[in-house]
Image: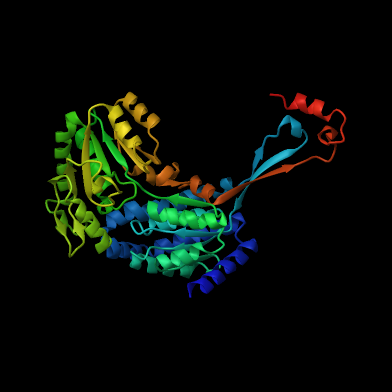
């Protein structure tokens, strides 16, 4: 059923792309502005959809989704013309008389598979990059956030013809059918396990792709950190969206000397942000599905709950929870948590923390709280991770000046700002040779060719 429909859609988009309509700067700029106008006009409905699917408050919806997309659009619109300009390239002595250029070129027809945890931002942000780079796009939103999925289809369908931008709703079977199509680029955001499936499908057709995945992102708190401020920023990063954030601090590595005081500060910050009973706070996020709720609730059986731990199965909510006495072999430390549960481990020397992180797959994010430059350099210089913050959490994702992406199991490729344009762009190298003269020594008929080549290309 899907295959014929999708095949027709992809061919329709390829035909439109080959017409050259998406190439001019004026066309791209006009489409980005149309997108911005449509999002502004539907902002109320976007907020309502996020409330319906994930119980996000208006504040959280705007600060973590809508506002970031607006900033991304404004930044792209402002800089697009300069990004599109071909760049001159130097030529070697062996190419005397020639000129080199690097030309930014769209890939063609792209596929964007979006996740459920930030179903607006993580769907529209890559779309901005795809359109800015001159591509057509097929978007597959998550079926776990059906209200937002339907709204995206409605909004984008009212602005763009499907030969340019199309939204296809559905589950994993729809994604599989889409991945079987002859696409020119794939952009996937989701779990590591599904990322492997996407990459395998792309490999069958040698389709280039970006994978924005996840992993267990550590948060290190050194002995010299200002604990009250540190606690507030950790609580913000961990419990926003009920912990369902790919770059949320997954676990804490705390210097033994400040652990007890830090826990107290975190408990105070939780009460300040969410009240004495977070489960009754109408602005506190809920878990996306029963399946995810039960997976998270099972983690509460491991370690020692020192704060929180209450759940509401009827509302799919879990109280912000701190766990102590956890070990690496426990399920809570074996997989990405993706919920409001924060395990806490100790260290005495910073090298211990570095070694613990390096013994595991490379994380998507890392956070370090310290005032000592030496500690900062030790961690940043010796741990591989996608990106992160010093003395904060999450905020590196919110600036278009920093490309965002993973490394190793946490993903490949990056986007945001110029990074989004680059991701959806092939940089084509072109050498234009002069016809005024020729270097005959390069031809096999030249008697002294090897002699000249040895002089020019010597080690």
| Residue 180: image location, x then y, percent | 52, 63
Q: Is residue 58 left or right of residue 452?
A: left
How many marks on residues?
Answer: 0
Residue nearest the viewer, comparing 407 with 106: 407
Rendering quarter of residue 265? top left
Image spot of residue 387 (x, y percent): 39, 40
Residue beneath the point at 19% across and 55% down = 318
Q: Is residue 406 visible?
A: no
User: Which quadrant would the C terminus be assigned to in this image?
Assistant: top right
Q: Nearer the viewer, residue 21 or 238?
A: 238
x and y percent of residue 253 in the render? 25, 36
Q: Is residue 342 above or below residue 142?
A: above
Depicted 136 relative to depicted 399: above or below? below
In-image side of 15 versus 199 (left or right): right
From this viewpoint, which residue is outermost toward the bottom?
A: 1
Quarter location, residue 403: top left
The residue lying at 38 percent from left, 54 percent from top is 193
Query: Where does residue 333 sit, x and y in percent of width and height?
Result: 26, 45
Camera-nearest residue between 83 and 222: 222
The type of colouring in the image is rainbow
Instruction: Please give the name of the residue rendered at 51% of the width and 56% of the height, measured from the top-left corner.
Output: 202
Q: Quadrant of residue 278?
A: bottom left
Can the viewer see residue 243 in this picture? Answer: yes
């Amino acid at each position: 059923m899907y295959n014929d429909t999708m095949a027709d859609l992809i061919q329709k988009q390829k035909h439109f792309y080959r017409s050259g309509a998406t190439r001019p700067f004026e066309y791209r700029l006009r489409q980005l502005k149309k997108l911005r106008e449509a999002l502004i006009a539907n902002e109320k409905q976007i907020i309502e959809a996020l409330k319906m699917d994930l119980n996000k408050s208006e504040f959280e919806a705007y600060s973590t989704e809508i506002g970031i997309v607006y900033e991304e659009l404004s930044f792209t619109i402002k800089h697009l013309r300069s990004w599109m300009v071909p760049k001159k390239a130097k030529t070697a002595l062996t190419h005397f008389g020639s000129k080199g250029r690097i030309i930014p070129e769209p890939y063609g027809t792209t596929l964007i598979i979006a996740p459920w945890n930030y179903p607006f931002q993580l769907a529209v942000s890559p779309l901005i990059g795809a359109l800015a780079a001159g591509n057509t796009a097929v978007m597959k939103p998550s079926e776990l956030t059906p209200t937002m999925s339907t709204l995206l289809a409605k909004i984008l369908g009212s602005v763009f013809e499907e030969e340019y931008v199309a939204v296809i709703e559905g589950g994993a079977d729809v994604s599989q059918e889409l991945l079987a199509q002859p696409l020119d680029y794939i952009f996937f955001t989701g779990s590591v396990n599904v990322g492997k499936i996407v990459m395998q499908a792309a490999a069958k057709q040698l389709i280039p792709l970006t994978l924005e995945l996840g992993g267990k992102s550590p948060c290190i708190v050194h002995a010299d950190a200002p604990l009250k401020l540190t606690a507030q920023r950790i609580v913000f990063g961990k419990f926003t969206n009920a912990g369902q954030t790919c770059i949320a601090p997954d676990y804490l590595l705390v210097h033994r000397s400040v652990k007890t005081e830090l826990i107290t500060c975190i408990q105070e910050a939780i009460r300040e942000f969410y009240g004495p009973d977070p489960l009754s706070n109408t602005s506190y996020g809920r878990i996306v599905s029963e399946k995810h709720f039960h997976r998270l609730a099972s983690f509460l059986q491991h370690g020692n709950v020192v704060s929180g731990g209450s759940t509401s199965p009827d509302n799919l909510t879990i109280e912000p929870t701190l766990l102590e006495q956890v070990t690496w072999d426990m399920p809570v430390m074996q997989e990405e948590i993706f919920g409001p549960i924060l395990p806490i481990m100790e260290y005495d020397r910073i090298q211990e923390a570095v070694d613990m992180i390096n013994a595991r797959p490379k994380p998507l994010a890392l956070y370090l709280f310290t005032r000592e430059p030496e500690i900062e350099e030790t961690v940043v210089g010796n741990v591989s991770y996608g990106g992160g913050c010093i003395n904060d959490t999450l905020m590196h994702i919110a600036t278009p000046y920093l490309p965002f992406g993973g490394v190793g199991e946490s993903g490949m490729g990056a986007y945001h700002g110029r990074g989004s344009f680059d991701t959806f762009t092939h940089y084509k190298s072109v050498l234009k040779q002069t016809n005024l003269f020729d270097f005959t020594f390069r031809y096999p008929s030249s008697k002294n060719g090897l002699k000249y080549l040895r002089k020019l290309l010597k080690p």
